[in-house]
Amino acid sequence: MESTQIESTVVEMARAARVASRALASVPAAVKDRVLLKTADALLAQKDAIAVENAKDLDAGRDKGLSAAMLDRLELSDKVISSMVQGLREVAALADPVGEVESMKRRPSGILVGRMRVPLGVVGMIYESRPNVTIDAAALCLKAGNAVILRGGSEAIHSNLALARVLREVLESEGLDPAVVQVIPVTDRAAINVLLDQEEYIDLIIPRGGEGLIRFVAENSRIPVLKHYKGVCHAYIDADADVETGIDIVMNGKTQRPGVCNALEGLLVHADIAEDFLPGAAAALERAGVELRGCVRSRGIVPSMTPAADGDWGTEFLDLVLAVRVVASMDEAIGYIERYGSRHTEVIVTRSYENGQRFLREVDASAVMINASSRFNDGGQFGLGAEIGISTTKLHAYGPMGLEELTTRKFIVYGEGEVRE
Amino acid sequence: MESTQIESTVVEMARAARVASRALASVPAAVKDRVLLKTADALLAQKDAIAVENAKDLDAGRDKGLSAAMLDRLELSDKVISSMVQGLREVAALADPVGEVESMKRRPSGILVGRMRVPLGVVGMIYESRPNVTIDAAALCLKAGNAVILRGGSEAIHSNLALARVLREVLESEGLDPAVVQVIPVTDRAAINVLLDQEEYIDLIIPRGGEGLIRFVAENSRIPVLKHYKGVCHAYIDADADVETGIDIVMNGKTQRPGVCNALEGLLVHADIAEDFLPGAAAALERAGVELRGCVRSRGIVPSMTPAADGDWGTEFLDLVLAVRVVASMDEAIGYIERYGSRHTEVIVTRSYENGQRFLREVDASAVMINASSRFNDGGQFGLGAEIGISTTKLHAYGPMGLEELTTRKFIVYGEGEVRE
């Protein structure tokens, strides 16, 4: 496609999304929920047709020499379809945030003032290979009253279009504008640049994928972006930590699912507890296949560790590798996290009331935890119902983003003819 | 100053602000309040020294041929000093938002999850001539635990530096880092560009001033910007409105302070009430010196109106001018507001329950009101205590921004050794 054609295609989609979003903002919850439930049924009913489109992507992927892991992420297996169906039903069951007013307060002038939750408008999602994001993200955007424009990876284009078609058919059958959910049919990367320029029509961009994609989006967008680049999460074992609790939390954080952003990448151990803690922790981690890269002091206690290189501090390994450092004080631990952390998730293991409170207060991260696994930083685990992403920037949302983060609040006023003095 | 020097000056200030903000985040409310109250006293005590610096700006302004209105805005009169002093005392009296946790909820895993309010970090304020913004904005940022970098108009540079010096001396006397409040000493506009590039150190930019300044900031910033370009506010007189209530609200909205962003710029009248409403409203407005620019239908009822030109719809007059249009339906009114409004403040005057509710729900603006004057869209009037600006963008804040909007919330977790299954 030529660049002028790409531009007109994407601009027209953005414009249509804006129009659709206006109407969607006042669609009752019951209608939105019916769309979600009917889409769940339709995905199951149309599984074969979806598989045909998915096979096109898988074949092309094999021809392009994609890795087995990439092909696995691309496949819309029965299990993936089931999880999308379950996700749709869960989102349908969530309370509709739109129109919610927490309280109205009487002001001295006589007016009653409150804040009503309203949709953001139009959301642009830019993501990499997993095609299930198409349904998961569309469901959350729709429930929050937003139109969504989806731009998945080029290798999943047939799958993404097929999934969106199912949703759009249901939207039409309910008398809603199908432009509420649109997949950009252009695989050229130029389409992303055009999308990121449509500040007149799009209110928020959410990128999900590798750090490269996210940096590209953040650097080229004229629209606000909610993002996290990476998750470099730490557990700090305080001087008077319970050793078993510490080992459980570090093992869970590092080994339960090492490839995700809330996995642990660094372990900080107070010098006073290092000799009690490190040998047992290292033995458990090494038994689980974790490579430990230690500072001089930790290797003095556990000689089997690999010497840590400078580049290991603050690295997102996404693998069974853990950087280990002995610190002389909690100040040093907090300073280390400040320098090497990614403001994602930080954990203290302690029995000290003061140290726990201080860590909660002073550590700057989207989630700060006492005596719990970093793996809990997740919309579902936190009770948001489902998440559309995690933000490590502080404006608007900090941490997992659920339905509420896909809305904003406007002020509403009930008066009886009041005027300003 | 050379451009490399400007750059290094501003970058160094931004870096110092970031460092200062870390320490400020855990300063107790009592210390912050003491700084605010001592600054109020110091402003009164150092009035003469401030006047000397202010006189330099006023002299330079006269030499440059600034208008009387501009010189008036520049002057730190006794009245302006008093209002800054009162503002400081009011902000000191507000509750500290930092550390607030609304609720902690137990999750099925056993963890307790809540959200703690924390400072944003570093705020950059870019504003035009009024030097009192230096104190007003610094007070709010400080109370919310943020460091602030202030860049006022070049014509107020001596005044701004003098005001900041008073605050910085108090900060130092309380053992706090004076880099919490910094005024950029460079009047060259290049300093703004450097400031807008410091995304590593600055979390939020708030521009206040004319539309030109705000567009410049929005277009050149790599940092999130909370802004409103202009206030084009409307009152819609519904078919069954109370006529007297409508006239009161329109008179107040247009004439009480025509030069501000929550003043009315447009009047929409339902055709069914136009003959009852317009003659009385027009008479009152014209007696108050308001020029009415009417559509054909409104001029058919009130022939004394000036014919409206196309360019009058959606114009921010900031003066005693009002665009008047008769509409055939509430749909037409909502469509007009959608097209010509600025998402600032929109008012319906009605006695209909359904129409009032529908207007609240469907009109997209930072404040939507039933039977109340648009002039109430203000942080003080809404109960926020004080405002640092108004946002008509939807991310993070929509409407007046007070202390709460200068903070964000991080997730906190209390655990007892829980790990993820």
Image (tube, coloured by chain):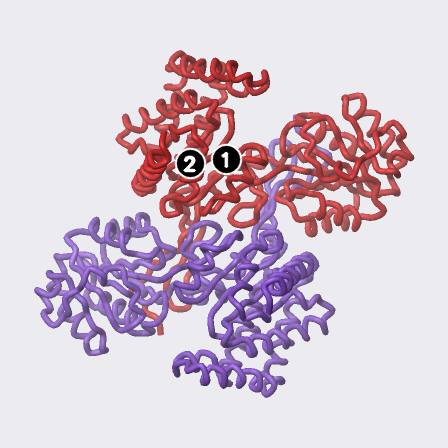
Chain colours: A purple, B red
For mark 1, give the secondary structure. Answer: loop
Horizontal relation, residue B347 to residue B142: left or right? right
Above/below status of A396 relative to B325? below
Q: What residue type is labelled 2?
A: Cys
Q: Which amino acid does label 1 sit on?
A: Ile
Q: Residue B344, position in %: x, y?
A: 63, 41
> Given the current orientation, which residue lies at the most extreme front position?
A2
- Callout 2: 10 Å neighbours few (<14), some, many (20+)? many
Chain under callout 1:
B
Mark seen at residue B388: 1
Above/below status of B412 relative to A110? below
The reply to whether the C-beta atoms of the residues labelled 1 and 2 are less than 8 Å apart is yes
Residue found at x 65% / y 67%: A32
* Residue A145 shows in the view: no
Residue found at x 59% / y 75%: A161
Q: Nearer the viewer, residue B104 or B165?
A: B165
